[in-house]
Image: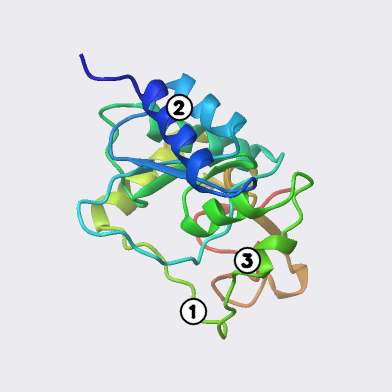
Amino acid sequence: MAPSQSTTSKTFSSKIDQVASLNGKGIFVSASAFQSSALNFARNKGMAAVRYLDEGNFKWELSRSLLAGTTTASERRSAAIRNAMIEQSYEPALHSTYATTPLGFTNSWSGILQGLLAAPDGENARLEHVIQHRPAVRQRVAYLTEHQIEAKANQVLQDIGYTCGRVNLSKLIDHELKISGLGVTFSQASWTAPAPIDIFQPQSEVLSKASGLTPPR
């Protein structure tokens, strides 16, 4: 009988203790689904547990930050990452790395290092010693096929109770605020000028009344 993941992670932890310093950090990587007990053990021992689903080599792109916080959007993302780690048949859509650290759940190697090297109070003083800062570059956006975009749009419309006719912009704004933390502001002075909705992360400003949209009252 093959050893359980919990047993394997305990063995891995003991090996780390044997060869590393007192504050040595370990990263347990697996392509298989994790058991909840293995995730809890890794967090309690100060290790990172990573589920890596890319069939190719590891990608050392440290661009995204740790997904942590107390907002509803962060909690939803954390639950999604945990689900990706424990569901045996999970198929990734955007990311190939899913992990838990003592600070929370993350889907980036940057977040893994932050979670391992940060102090218990969340300060990143130790992390600064190993980071080589680079000039700011453009953020990469994951490619979505037309089918994926249509599916996501239909899901959003379904979530806000859309049936037919005009889309209720107020419901759409509330939905995105809860899901992704995106805020929207309106410039009343420009409602008569034809213009698209301009987005400024993390807020968007509606500059004119778009066709088919019902502005909030």
Front one among 114 and 71: 114
Q: Residues within 10 Å of mark 3 (few under 14, many from 20)?
A: few
> Of the residues shown, which amino acid type is indicated by label 2?
Lys
Point out which mark residue 10 bears.
2
Rendered image quadrant of residue 60: bottom left
Would you name the residue on which mark 3 appears?
Answer: 201
- From this viewpoint, is residue 169 visible? no
Q: Is residue 129 above or below residue 51?
A: below
**Circle number at residue 138:** 1
| Nearer-the-camera pick, 188 or 197 | 197
**Disc 1 or disc 2, which is closer to the eye?**
2
- Residue ID at (48%, 65%): 62
Q: CA distance from mark 3 to mark 2?
A: 42 Å
* Residue at 63 percent of width and 54 percent of height: 117
**Percent of width and height locating residue 20:** 53, 48
Q: Secondary structure at mark 3?
A: loop
Q: Residue at x 54, y 72 (%)?
A: 196
Q: Amino acid at mark 1?
A: Arg
The quadrant in which residue 101 appears is: top right
For the residues labelled 1 and 3, the Cα–Cα distance comes to 14 Å
Left or right for 139, reference 131: left
Separation (CA) of disc 1 from disc 2 = 40 Å
Label 3 sits on what residue type? Gln
Nearer the observer, disc 1 or disc 3? 1
Numbered disc 2: secondary structure:
helix
Q: Look at the picture and state if 48 lies above or below 126.
A: above
Percent position of residue 122, x then y? 74, 50
Q: Earlier in the sequence, mark 1 or mark 3?
A: 1
Label 1 residue SS: loop
